[in-house]
Image (cartoon, rainbow, N blue to C red):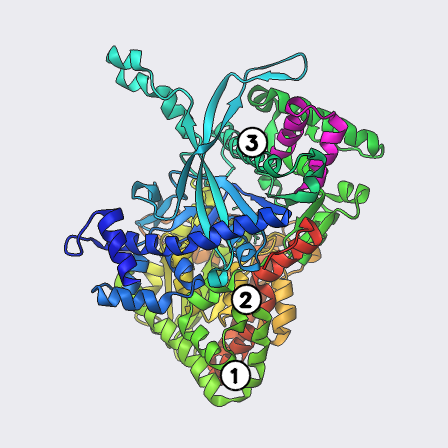
Amino acid sequence: MKDAIGRHLSYSIGKTPGAATLRDWRMAVSLAIRDRMADAWFASTRRTYEAGAKRVYYLSMEFLVGRLLEDGIVNLRLEERVSEALAELGQDYAEVIADEPDAALGNGGLGRLAACYLESMSTLGCPAYGYGIRYEHGLFRQQIVDGRQVERPETWLQQPHAWEFERPESRYEIGFGGSVRDGTVWTPGESVWAEAFDTPVAGWNGRWVNTLRLWSAKPTEPFDLDRFNRGEYAAAAESEALARTISRVLYPDDTTEQGKELRLKQEYFFSAASIRDILRRFESQFSDLRQLPEKVAIQLNDTHPAIAGPELVRLLCDEKGLDFDEALQIAQGTLNYTNHTLLPEALEHWPEGLFGRLLPRHLAIIDRIDHAHAKANPSRTSSVRDHGQVKMGELSFIMANRVNGVSALHTELMKSTVFAELHRLHPERIVNQTNGVTPRRWLLSCNRRLSTLIEERLGLGWVDDLEQLHDLEPHLDDPAFLDAYAAAKTANKADLADWMNRTQEGLTADPAMMFDVQIKRIHEYKRQHLNILETIALWQAMRDAPNAGWTPRLKLFAGKAAPGYVFAKEIIHLINAVAKVVNADKITNKMLQVAFLPNYNVSLAEKLIPAADLSEQISTAGKEASGTGNMKFALNGALTIGTLDGANVEIRDRVGAENFFLFGMTTDEVDQRRAIPDHAAKAVEADSRLARALAAVRDGRFSPEDPGLFRGIADNISGPDYFLVASDFSDYWRAQREVDGAFANAGDWTRRAALNTARSGWFSSDRAIRGYLDDIWGAETLL
Ligand code: F58
């Protein structure tokens, strides 16, 4: 290992040890690890070809992979060797690992899920490719300036990226616009190259390695030399810049109007390149396109790649000469669709005008698909094109062999709400696959203390068979085990407290406090404002009775708001304003501290989750499709305070109701409550704590220099309150006081935490991927 690192430092990076920077060392180590993936990578490809096996293609606009070096080292089981080698080379292992920028090619749960699934597909030996976009700029970097979110560009690719291989030979010309002649001959008005970059994804033990193939947009006409020679330098590079725009930035949300066209271009760009690549690979091995559903399963990660359906039909008809019905049947047998949200504003639809201008042939094909579907299902009343919009959820559904939700509750709600009619017509199509998370990253490597303890008791079999964690349960009767479990948590908290106290102005975190954590995108339905309101009420109660024996708490928040989502940004501002006041209050600040940690990303989650005592999963029932952070927390021994929403329901079923703090209305109750006029005002009237906390927000207690600053938040909660913050407040308060009492009994708390770990094995992404293999893809694993 030492030689390998040294060789890369000299001959790949071109530095002597004396001149090498931390980044040089990190690059050298990364290349040495990447080398060790190569043979298994080639072998995996060879095995797949030899077996004539079915391949799985996971199409996703987002892969939120985070740092890759530690993941590679851990999965190849090279930790000791690398850290020894680095020590001999005078380098610090942890520093080298931490030098890597996060690859933030995703917004949140959907993108992180794709990354966990890729890793699990490799662990299981499922022949698979991930297909996405190689964004030059990932999700924005969040700074907090005067309590407010400020977005800065993210620049992970400004330094060389160790993990990828550029494949200039694998490129496709992707067209846009133009016209259609004779009904089928599409002549695009402009085009770009999609060029492939491959990253190997090694599974546990490095026995199988799949590929993440990301497309980068390149101009077909690189550069206008004539204009350059005339001195028009900027204009000479214009077409190049325009083409590259397609893979320039990750969309931070799809709620703004501007950039809609670019987003649709991005979607078509990567879907079309992926479909062509899939067909090319298929045809290199098989001759009959009718075998496609037998040999290929394509998973659409939400509707962002939905245009892959019409594109596949187009290629099969217009280029391969199949008739439409056969092409449609093949496509439908090959494609599957995962839905990740029921929020109406997040369901994708495109204005027909824009769609037809950009993809005229596809719009015609969609009409034909829709028509064929309506003909086969005469009782259908809806259609893909509706009120001048092209609805991508409907399109995905009718193009898919299987459609899945991501938790049991979410899947049932899909059937009864957004897809009710299509479900009636195709009752076998919707299936559930509850999300999962990879235990390699989310326990073994992010929580060394706990994973070492588990290894001492159970060995390492649980790492790729996570239900083995059940075997911890007998150990809970051993006081030494519980002590060690508690010690691991406390040490994780102490590390985090040290780091936070150094980096967060005004914060004095003490590991003896309860670490109460809410980390996720900032959104009204996730209700960070419910949490901060309870924090305010708690602070007020503490001030009223400072000696009432309060359980000391640290309230931790982190998460990004979409740049155009004003209310979410106000919530961030309010949290920071409350933190400032509360942390400075001498009466309460030994009992209550609040922090908003900037720039939440995968690496920060890896620091926070192992140190959490309490996991906040408090969305309005029916709104969080699943959640995956909730699973990571439970696995790492945090107890959940949560609503009956998404996968919380299944977590509670598994860890036991007595080890989960439930509160709030159910999905049905939410609907009923909303129908009551003035429901929020009534809730405020009925709860004096809530009224007082809201008054403090409204009257400028946290914004003395601008008393009206947070009035909008207070007015929203006591007025329309669509997400029922007011109506759920009292029960949330009650559950939080129950948490206080439980935490005060340290021995019992640890036992309940350990039970969460022991009973969370089902939430492994390995289990989820087995479900997809069996129920959706019909594919075999080759290990
Ligand atoms: C999330 N969706 C769900 N969307 O909210 C969460 O409940 C679920 O656990 C997770 O998917 C995985 O199934 C999500 O992350 C996005 O990030 C969208 C991406 C495109 C722009 C709008 C947000």
Mark closest to the chain's N terminus, 1 or 3: 3
Q: Main secondary structure of the magenta part?
A: helix
Please give the residue where the numbered disc 2 appears in the rendered image.
Answer: 464
Name the image quarter holding the C terminus.
bottom right
Q: Which residue is at a point 77% across and 44% down the rendered structure image? A: 423
What separation in Å lies between label 1 and label 3 (alpha carbons)? 55 Å
Q: Label 2: how many residues lie within 10 Å, few (<14), some (14-19) or many (20+)? A: many
Q: Is residue 502 magenta?
A: no
Q: Which of 44 and 492 is in front in this view?
A: 44
Q: What is the residue that sits farthest to the right in this orientation?
A: 378
Please give the residue where the numbered disc 3 appears in the rendered image.
Answer: 272
Please give the residue where the numbered disc 1 appears in the rendered image.
Answer: 748
Query: Which image quadrant is residue 511 in?
Result: bottom left
Find residue 80 and report its horizontal and vertical position in percent: 35, 69
Q: What is the residue that sits farthest to the left in this orientation?
A: 18
Q: Nearer the viewer, residue 377 or 59?
A: 59
Mark closest to the chain's N terminus, 1 or 2: 2
Query: Magenta part of the protein: which range?
Result: 307-336
